[in-house]
Image (cartoon, rainbow, N blue to C red):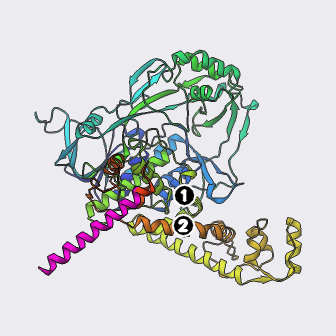
Amino acid sequence: MKSNSDYDIIVIGAGHAGCEAALASARMGLSTCIFTMNLDTIGQMSCNPAIGGLAKSHLVKEIDALGGEMAKITDKAGIQFKILNKSKGPAVWATRVQADRALYRKYMRESLETQAGLDIRQEKVEELLVDKNQVYGIKTTGNPSPHPSPARGEGERIYNAKAVIIAAGTFLNGLIHIGLENFPAGRAGEPPSTRLSKSLSDIGFKIGRLKTGTPPRLDVKGIDFSVMSIQEGDVPSSAMSLFTKEITNSQLPCYMTYTNERTHKIILDNLKYSPLYSGVIKGIGPRYCPSIEDKVVKFSDKPKHQIFLEPEGIDTDEYYANGISTSLPQEVQVKLVRSIKGLENAEIKKFGYAIEYDFVYPTQLKPTLETKPIQGLFLAGQINGTSGYEEAAAQGLIAGINAALKIKGKEPFILGRHEAYIGVLIDDLVTKGTKEPYRMFTSRAEYRLLLRQDNADLRLMEKGFNLGLINNEQFNQLLEKKTLIEAEIKRIKSTRVKPDIINPVLAKLGGTPVKENASLYQLLKRPEIRYADIAKISAPHPNPSPLRGSEGRGELSHDVIIQVEIQTKYKGYIQRQADLAEKFKKIEEKQIPEGFIYKGIPGLSREIVEKLEEVRPFNLGQASRISGMTPAAISLLMVAVERRKREQNQNVKIKNQN
């Protein structure tokens, strides 16, 4: 523990963003302190008890490949593992894991407590300390100062830092709504942070208001699962993390039921008591995760809506009613729950609610997640307008990395849209901004066939190694995996098989027979052929390896087989996207000088100039993605940037001659 109050990096908030940020900066050798108002809620899963899902698992696996923690903790706490979209192409495969809330908190707290160079403090951060557009620390209350000062006030403490990362979740001016009643809170049972939000506003940040919500939690004793459809996990379980060797927890099922016309009538009859529809809530809610009130009103033609009952953990009798997020009064919540098949006798243990909170418009951030107005101040998570644990954790990791790199005087770490979903997420936020809670989807990524969840390690682990977040053993395992993939593709290209061996296999699979010898590679390109099929007509691979089958007979591991299969079957499509990504990189490399003056560029409208001044893009690629930007404006900007560079080069040449 440090003997004074000075740190390299201070992290405010110990949710998913804060934990990743603190762990990353500490692992990169920077003295770090993470501040939370409650040690018992470190890593709290405030909403649904699940990690991953469509596009979100891509983020989690990218965090994992870069050396982050979320995937490892998910596997330790996981109680149901499922691969979604297996019937579709690999670009949209997604891993979703139900997690035990208590175990997730336990293991994440252990990770923080055992991390060298990381302190944890239970104190409330009240104010940012800024001088000449540079953050230099924070002011807190909570632990009385051993040396009270009239200048500070009783119980206040000042901590100095070279960088500060704010990951405050929904706590900034948080306001909970249940019916027409509301009260200040960061989440149920926890106080909000009001002075920190004011501190940001006083500095000059543009602050907005968003809303999210949560459904009621039900007592298992009143649920009749026999009338519901059971949702089992995959057997065997597919781990979220690259580094997980075994899933050890008991696996639990989920259940599915539906709302009905009676449920919808109860909701419609009580809309006047809904804070959302009575005008009490001002914040904008998540479009893609609406409340049950929203679903019933906006999709009035639908006679029913799905509800997934998800266990909150192994040793708890609570179930999360995913699909009926609501802020209706408590007595109405009881009626609507009991109108649902299988929930006629259900007891609500915790009522649903909506929460409004402050966020900072993310166009005020650089792609490093450092704020433009204040040097050394980074923002991560819901404060930037995002929704979801995975989006928050991804931002926390990038903020922690870049805060550490800034202090070390090294180049920033910025992932491109062609490199990672994390790159798409951050570029969307800082370039386009958001006025509603942002959620990641595969459709947001232009190069999603390149950015699959199965190849996150091949794309990003070397970057994590260079940052010092991936160790030598992990990196060497990656190198061996790459070698095995290349060797196996080379082998199946060179191994040719006669028709009399191939055709019986093709006949069983309904494939067209061949008349000539064919390579295993040509066969694997066929849609009906899987790697397991060519393995039947091929000798086993020599040279056993840890990445091959556990019996050491030479079989390749599942991860290697998946890569061989995907890289063979989708080679043409992958190459086409890779070529597009290469063209994209060329425009991304056309940098716009810092402090570039947009006013006065002939042909640019005042509206375009204002948008460029607000975002201050780093390159022409980012400029092209600003909302409302036209191809003509980009052409004019490109000419102006080139002219500026020529003028600067000419001035340097004249100066050198003199």
Rendered residue at 65%/46% (across/down): 251
- Mark 1 sits on what residue? 446
Q: Residue at x 46, y 43 (%)?
A: 105
Q: Can I make out residue 557 in this image? A: no
Horizontal and vertical percent position of residue 85: 67, 52
- Disc 1 + disc 2, Cβ < 8 Å: yes
Quick one: SS at disc 2? Answer: helix
Q: How many marks?
A: 2
Q: Is residue 247 left or right of residue 362?
A: right
Residue 70 shows up from this direction? yes
Could you say whether the residue bearing mark 1 is in a helix, strand or loop?
loop
- Indicate left or right for 224 with 140 as reference: right
Identify the mark nearer the N-term, 1 or 2: 1
Instruction: State which region is magenta.
Output: 633-658
Above or below, 99 against 468 in this view is above
Q: Is residue 634 magenta?
A: yes
Residue 222 x/y as whole percent? 66, 24
Judging depth in this view, the residue of 602 and 590 nearest the camera is 602
Give the residue type that dot 1 points to.
Glu
Could you say where residue 29 lies in the image, as x and y percent from the top left?
Answer: 31, 62
Residue with the mark numbered 2: 580
Give the quarter of the figure containing the C terminus: bottom left
Q: Quadrant of residue 290?
A: top right
Quarter of the image holding residue 624? bottom left
Q: CA distance from mark 1 to mark 2?
A: 10 Å
* Disc 2 crowd, CA 10 A, few/some/many (<14, 14-19, 20+): some
Q: Residues within 10 Å of mark 1 (few under 14, many from 20)?
A: some
Q: Residue furthest front?
A: 603
Type of secondary structure dominating the magenta stretch: helix
Question: Which amino acid is tagged 2?
Answer: Leu
Q: 578 or 629: nearer the eye?
A: 629
